[in-house]
Image (cartoon, helix red, strand yellow):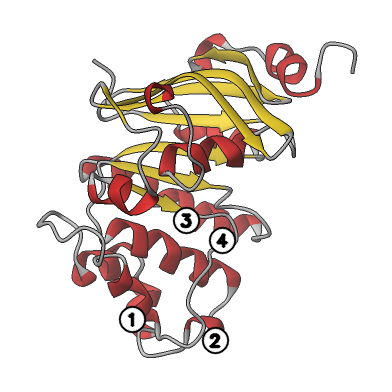
Amino acid sequence: MALLQTHGLVARYGDFQALFGVDIMLNEAETIAIIGANGAGKTTLMRSIAGVLRNDAASVLLDGKPIGTRPAEEIMSQGVAMVPEGRKLFPSLSVEENLLIGTYGRKIGGHWTLETVYDLFPILRERRHSPGTALSGGQQQMVAIGRALMSNPRVLLCDEISLGLAPVVIKDIYKAIPQIKAAGASLIIVEQDIAQAIAVADRVYCMMEGRVTLSGTPDTLSRDDIHNAYFGAGH
């Protein structure tokens, strides 16, 4: 049985329909990447899984149980944590206080503690008393990832974690993914950077205009397949 799946997931913002029957599946100890252009519905999919958007109960399943109508706090308490697009740190809090917020919704023992997060991102140990806003974009992203890890999630949702960062910084952040996986989390990574996503993923889904247009393992998807699924065959 899949750890997490969406089944015929439809999502709307008022009258605007953003997702049209999306089916994805995440297995235990797996990393899947969701790629697609801006406006493809990737963030809406993440928000639906995390409970920020409510959907039909059976359209999102965790361990085979319907969670589509559950609020975000409850989904987090069941082990689904999100690194939101744009990082969303608390500006008045220090790095360490921002990290500790990650434990509020789910107090559970596990691999991730302040110490192990600092081992993963050593620069955060040095900056732990600095305000979150005093950090570079890349360091803020590390805090956002660390904060999500502090809940010792079973599923980690990463929404556009490379957005607006320099390539060298992106490389540093992506270096952490195998360690996160080794510590027991399964990951869903939403990315516009196709190469980056495919490099860490076991399977890839491509979305366009609210639908899944392609899925497969990185070694079976050709560049043309991905291009057509990403932009449409006419481009």
- The answer to whether the residue labelled 2 contacts the one labelled 1, judged by CB atoms less than 8 Å apart, is no
Picture disc at residue 169: 4
Cα–Cα gap, marks 2 and 3: 19 Å
Residue at the disc numbered 3: 173
SS assignment at label 1: helix
Query: Which is nearer the eye, 184 or 168?
Result: 184
Q: Is residue 210 above or below residue 117?
A: above
- The answer to whether the residue labelled 4 contacts the one labelled 1, judged by CB atoms less than 8 Å apart, is no
Q: Is residue 219 above or below residue 124?
A: above
Cα–Cα gap, marks 4 and 1: 23 Å
Q: Amino acid at mark 3?
A: Ile
Mark 2 or 3, nearer chain start: 2
Residue at the disc numbered 2: 134
SS assignment at label 3: helix
Q: Is residue 4 above or below residue 148?
A: above
Mark 4 or 1, nearer chain start: 1
> Can you tell which quarter of the image residue 119 is in?
bottom left
Q: Is residue 5 above or below residue 190?
A: above
Q: Nearer the viewer, mark 2 or mark 4?
A: 2
> Can you tell which quarter of the image residue 115 is in?
bottom left
Mark 2 or 4, nearer chain start: 2
Residue at the disc numbered 1: 97
Q: Nearer the viewer, mark 3 or mark 1?
A: 1
Q: Is residue 198 visible?
A: no
- The answer to whether the residue labelled 3 contacts the one labelled 4, judged by CB atoms less than 8 Å apart, is yes
Cα–Cα gap, marks 3 and 1: 21 Å
- Mark 3 closeness class: few <14, some 14–19, many ≥20 residues within 10 Å: many
